[in-house]
Image (cartoon, rainbow, N blue to C red):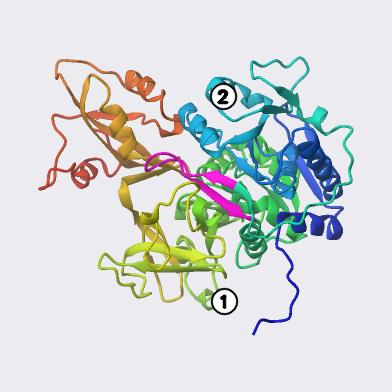
Amino acid sequence: MEGLMMHYPLTTTTILEYGNSAFHHKKVISHLPDGSRHEYRFSDLYKRTKQLANALTKKLGVTRGDMVGTFAWNHYQHLELYYGIPGIGAICHTINIRLSSQQTEFIINHSEDKVIFVDATLVPLLEKIAAQLETVEKYIIINAPEGFTTTLPEVLHYEDLLKDNSEEFEWPALNENDACGMCYTSGTTGLPKGVLYSHRSTYLHASTILSPNAANCSNRDVMLLIVPQFHVMAWGFPYMCILAGADMVMPSLHLQPEAIIRILQEEKVTKANGVPTIWLGVYEAMKKNPPKEKLVLEEYLVGGSALPASLIEGFERDFGIRGVQAWGMTETSPLGTVARLQPKHESLSEKEKLHIRAKQGIEFPGIEMRIVKDDGTVAPRDGKTMGELQVRGAWVLRSYFKTLNQENFSEDGWFKTGDVSTIDEDGYMHITDRTKDLIKSGGEWISSVALESALMSHPKIKEAAVIAIPDDTWSERPLASIVLADANEKVTKEEMMEFLARDFAKYQIPEHYVFIDQVPRTSVGKFDKKEIRKRYAEGKLG
């Protein structure tokens, strides 16, 4: 027997409507690429999003199910796109600006973007590949300065697109299971793969992560969104903040430590997010030049890679600011866990507390986790038994876009993360290693296999094995062990970096190279990366 409750669709439009109804006075503050500051209220966001909806349907001919790409920084116009595009039944495809030209071209063609909204400062990146983009009909330029020119075809300017459109728009009836957004993985095990989020998954993710046990976000907060809107929907924070009634601060391209500190001070930010690399830079800058006035920042939420215990300690000791570890993936929308202490931990020593806080944390309601051993059995929650982390839940993908990829799922439907982990008796998950030799640098994955394949296509290189080495700034960086085809030949570091730059984003390219006589191999002839790691495990290249 079914319950007799209303069928109320959980959509992004209901988030926007709620924000306008309950928190119309709350603010969205943008520090724009040109250095100017823009501020408006949720009520303005609401009106302009409806203008955008009219423009999308009437001026651009965007219809239900169309892909609309964004290639932009964090700012209020990008926020309008987060709501306006899915609001008409189209799909907001956020394109990662840090990928290589080859990857960007593939993603846009694979997704079949009809229109792309692009920041003026990023236009040169699209100009390089525009001739190869098969489905794009229009480019809408955001924040273009006076006299701006481009070789992109079929160009309109964002504000010109919005002006003269009505602020009245009736949202179409949407199915909560309809697609609303899409992000691609960074292509660490091959070509990037699309993850297609639904209205329902987006709503449930946003409404769950605002809780005190998660991002701890309320209408008393001023939230700085450092995580890019082009990266996993900015961790869902643009949706969460509207539901929570939190003021939002968007930094666009102002991501240098000094710029972030200035924004934290000027806007009286209470909460923020970001990868560890960002916060390491902020901490070092604050140590070097302590702020004249104490920041009101209470805590920063970190994901993408492990939050170093030393950084947690340093920020709290020197500035009274909490670091909170979270974990997630593009495939999990992305947040799946957070590591917060419980009342039972209050009697523990500071060292014991730090050990817990440095883990990836406890899953949220709506997410389940398990550890599966090599023999296929589920590991006990003892904090010791390792295996592959598998997840399922209300905002976990069930298939990649246009790809079956059944090897990524267990027979009973759990998603295989590829992370080697443990879960303790209190439910805290801890990632101990990673499969497939992936390198995680500054919160971004890098494929050692892809780098090896590219390097070995160089005419002077016979063999190449790539591993991760520790890095104080980026957590890990790739190191390439090279065997030359001719021992008498010379290959410079700069030559190899330039060679790789054709196919890889800048952050994916190794800056560390060592030359060896032969790559050590296992008994079955595979590269013995364990042996290579023994030589360079401490990041020492001598």
Q: Is residue 371 or residue 414 the one in the foreground?
A: 414
Mark 2 = which residue?
A: 125
Quadrant containing the C terminus is top left
- Characterize the local packing of mark 1: few (<14), some (14-19) or many (20 or more) Cα atoms within 10 angstroms: few
> At which x and y percent is residue 190?
38, 40
**Magenta span covers which residues?**
182-198
Q: Nearer the viewer, residue 426 or 484?
A: 484
Residue at the spot 73% in from the left edge and 17% down from the top edge: 148
Q: Which residue is mark 1?
A: 343
The quadrant of the image that shows the N terminus is bottom right
**Disc 2 from disc 1: Cα separation:** 50 Å
Q: Is residue 144 above or below residue 422?
A: above
| Drawn side of residue 207 relative to residue 189, left or right | right
- Measured as percent of width and height from the top left, residue 222 is found at 74, 52
Query: Looking at the image, is 232 positioned above or below residue 73?
Result: below
Amino acid identity at mark 1: Pro
Res. 71 visible in picture: no
Type of amino acid under label 2:
Leu
Q: Can you name the residue that lies furthest to the left here?
A: 523
Q: In the image, which disc is placed on residue 433?
A: none
**387 drawn magenta:** no
Identified at 63% across, 23% down, the residue is 123
Q: Is residue 189 magenta?
A: yes
Where's residue 262, x and y in %?
69, 38
Whether residue 111 is visible, yes or no, is yes
